[in-house]
Amino acid sequence: MADVEISGDGSGNSKRRRLSDGAARLHNDDDSPPNCLADLPSGILAHTASFLAAPSRVLLLHALNDSDDDVPSSSSAIVGSHHEVLDFGQIEKDLAEKLSDQDIQRILLHTDAVNKVKKLLLTNCIKMTGVGLEPLRGSEIIEQIDLSIVEFVGDDRETSISCDHVLPILDSLIEREGPAMKHLQFPKKWRKEVVTESDFHAFLGRYNQMWEGRGRIDCPMCKEQSVLAYDGEEQDIIGPWVYTSEHSEEWNFYGTHNNVCYGCLKYSCGECDDGGSLLHFCYKCERTYCVHCATLNYCSVCEKEYCLDYCKEFYSCDGRPDADFGDYDFKCGQNICEDCVYSERRECRKCKKSYCSTDCSNRTYDEDEINRCDHCCSFLCYDCDNPLSSSNTLAVADFFNKVLSGRHDIDKLRKCGDCNKAACADCQLKFGKSVENLDCKGCVKMIVSALLEEKEMKKELQGELERKNERLESNSAQIEELKEENCRLKNGIKEVKNAIKGLPM
């Protein structure tokens, strides 16, 4: 071992540590110093690569070499040997978006994907057409391929993946005897429309036939229902493995899996509740999960489920629909997804509380009650709209504090008698600055009335404030007089005490 001295901070003290001769002097066979990363010892490169995801390891290997023919013998140490899961979502998004079919083919070849990879997730590989998946052809062990490329519905990035290149490779995986395939996640652009004459639709039929060829598969949870569904004599049909029609008027399930969890690849009939193992479909990422792999929340407004936090944030309804019946401690608590809160303006713009329905926010069950602005769609809950009638003592206290301090703002939704549209305080103020641009005479009258009312209220508050100041000034004068009187009394008491001391005993 060679001792390497590292100087301290100039105080004469130094630290010493022992390094191996190879690590102390990085050199080539001719003792020349390294000029690039490729000249570093293979052990250091392998250790560095161990911190990278599998796709990045192969990319590092090719960055160190000029061509595929110039791959060093140490490549296996850099690439590694454990590659059951190859997830391109583990590398930086910008890098994954730049990968070509040639890059992906290199990665599959150097990881020996045909013999080692069981799960392949091609997240963010938008430039890939599918030609680069050729090294997977004929794999006997691969169980899952995610071809969706983008993670969520609504991701508008243009993808290049093509049925013409991918389907022949997928056929080679499902046509062999005893295929290992359990789950295929298809791109959204393949599933947008049901075209029964398309090559993709024909493949879905072959894929379902692969499952049928496995015979009856009982649900491992309830041990009763058959997971498999096909047109035969089975009476406990749950549904197809992959939907080949829309199966829904509200949502397109075409080309999505039915009875297999995306995470653990376990089967379930989807209707049993043995140990909480129900399957749930997320409408954002369009994947089916069991409760052990992901937590999905149900939105009481749009009546859809989403992966909690990862796909959608959820809010709890703050309404108390039974408050008018004396149950002030009852809270609705139903879940509302972020889209329904913001797109449908279900958050009170004043107190920022979320509500699932008019009943919860209104508590009056009166259809004529004004709660929402028809111009900006802002929402005002009952407590904020009617602070004096509110069961919320904090709202009442806040109202009086603003009035007494002269900071009360008219935040009342007002409805036009002609067009029947309601306007919030912000819209009233906006319209008040340009009344001449309003087409509805009723709205003009309403806005002018609101402005006059606000002016009158401010005048009253200003008068109350002036009267309060006068009382304070009067009280201040009285206090000064009392202070002077107190001083005179103290002086008188002192004189009396002195006089008493001067009397003969």
Image: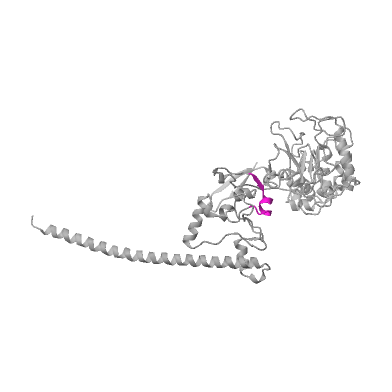
In this view of the protein, can residue 137 be seen by the observer?
A: no
**392 shown above or below 447:** above
**Farthest right residue in view:** 197
In the rendering, at what x and y percent does residue 316 appear? Answer: 62, 46
**Farthest top residue in view:** 223
In the rendering, at what x and y percent does residue 56 appear? Answer: 76, 47
- Residue 361 is left or right of residue 25, and the answer is left
Magenta highlight on residue 323 = no
**Farthest left residue in view:** 504
Magenta highlight on residue 339 = yes
Quarter of the image where one finds residue 298? top right
- Residue 5 is left or right of residue 183, and the answer is left
Observer-nearest of 158 and 375 = 375
**74 shown above or below 35:** above
The quadrant of the rendering that contains the N terminus is top right
* Residue at the image position 25 percent from the left and 63 percent from the top: 487
The quadrant of the rendering that contains the C terminus is bottom left
Observer-nearest of 46 and 31 = 46
- Residue 137 is left or right of residue 2, and the answer is right
Observer-nearest of 396 and 299 = 396
In the rendering, at what x and y percent does residue 446 appear? Answer: 61, 65
Observer-nearest of 157 and 335 = 335
First to last magenta residue range: 334-346
* Residue at the image position 88 percent from the left and 47 percent from the top: 195
In this view of the protein, can residue 192 be seen by the observer?
A: yes
